[in-house]
Image (cartoon, grey):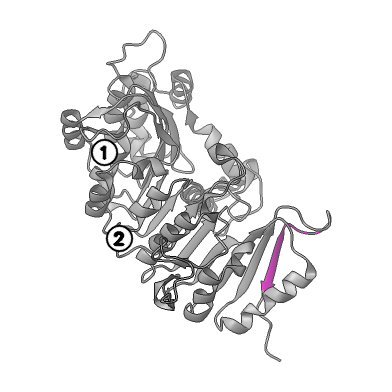
Amino acid sequence: MRSLNVSLTTSINWRLVCKRAKNGIDDMFEKEAVRFYNSRQTASTALPQRMTQLNQKYSFKNGERVQKFLSHFGATSSRFSTKAKINNPFLSRSLHLSTQCEEGEDPKVVNPCRVLMLENFGHHIHNITFHISGTLLGDSLIHFRALLPLVPNLKCLKIVGCAEDWVESEEFIRVVVRLPNLEQLEVLDVEGFKEEFSNFLSKSKFTLNELLVEKYGPCLKTLICGEELFKRENVGKLLNSALNNLKTLRLAPVTHSNTLMTLSEIDAPELEELEIWGEDGGGGCGNHDPFADTVFGQDFIRAVNNFAASLAHLKLHEIRLANETLSWDSSQDEHDPDDDDDKKLVISEMPKLTTLTMQLSNLIIPWFWNPIRLNSHHLEELTLTTYSISRGGLEQLKQEFGVFSKLKRIVIHCAYPEKSSESKKIVLARPLLS
């Protein structure tokens, strides 16, 4: 069933009409949940309001909400009957669960209500968000390890929160062995999980992000992470050994050149989609865009070129590239008479590229846009973001249909349209042949 523009209440009521309607609505909910777990929420990926409401219903940030949920389904202190367990109470097959130890609880004992809920209904869950905070070797990690095996059919694992302590080497090995084999797991999202340590570059310790990649990397199709995962020396070897089957990589935000250097050394021969987020003028960079720097631009090219042969989808958000010619030898005198085109850095041929998302301003960057125009003959959709665009600018964009023979449409997202009555989303379709 296609996504319908109706409220959550209406959708639920439609489920009561007949079995076919129930199955159709449930299928729609699950597909929308997958979209929610696989994409950042932007103008182009916005989900219906009902999905936000549905996610809130299955967000259990404290034990009291879990108890209310169990009481609603008639559970107290024992497991449900086999018949009751067949019924799926999670319409989107998604769950947000906190692992924090609450006041008055023994930090070494997992909350029994959380265990009871997952023992009975965990097999229905396909997407789960664990909120972990505090000391990793304390209550949160203990609870996480105990609860994770109770969701055996998990397809997407998302971790959010903040850690304040290390996983020591010995503990790392022990935890990896004890973590369950999640045979259906395809997506790991640790972008919202921050690990704040005083000696971050220590080689003798491991982070939870590294632990999860080590354990589940070989089965992953999608990895969503922040650049914390790329900061430590040993991570390149770890990623190369774990990500051979990866199809999609989303990295956000990128603020350091070293992140791109590590990215350029990752061996992921099957990677089809690369999504990189810069900063939108906020955060630690103020109004400075690091991608406008020459060194940053060089490492960006190397990173993209590393996956050029297999990429079908390239998404660059909040990234404004440097408008200058880049060379392999940045120390070379700009007046060197021996300078030649072989030393210029350009984007490699991407023969499989079908969709490209980026800022409109990058169309005037020769070392980036010109090679794409020359070599990406299978491009089908171009998505551009900008503050605003004039009618003249739209007419210029239409010329790209003459360059890319398979280009079906150009989508422009405007933050501030020229007139308040104009749409923030403009779609240019390929003109029909007369």
Q: Pinpoint residue 356: horizontal percent, then vertical percent.
A: 53, 66
- Name the residue carrying label 2: 268
Q: Left or right: where does residue 307 sit relative to residue 215?
A: right
Which of the two discs, 2 and 1, labels the residue nearer the N terminus?
1
Assess whether residue 138 is covered by the magenta stretch: no
Q: Nearer the viewer, residue 45 or 344?
A: 344
Stretch of the chain drawn in magenta: 422-428
Q: Residue at x 68, y 74 (%)?
A: 397
Q: Nearer the viewer, residue 285 or 128?
A: 285
Q: Is residue 235 above or below residue 71?
A: below
**Does residue 4 appear in the picture of this structure?**
yes
Q: Residue at x 32, y 38 (%)?
A: 209
Give the Cα separation between the discs numbered 2 and 1: 19 Å
Mark identifier at residue 211: 1
Q: Is residue 367 above or below residue 57?
A: below
The image quadrant where one finds the C terminus is bottom right
Q: Pinpoint residue 213: horizontal percent, then vertical percent.
A: 28, 44
**Res 304 quadrant in image:** bottom left
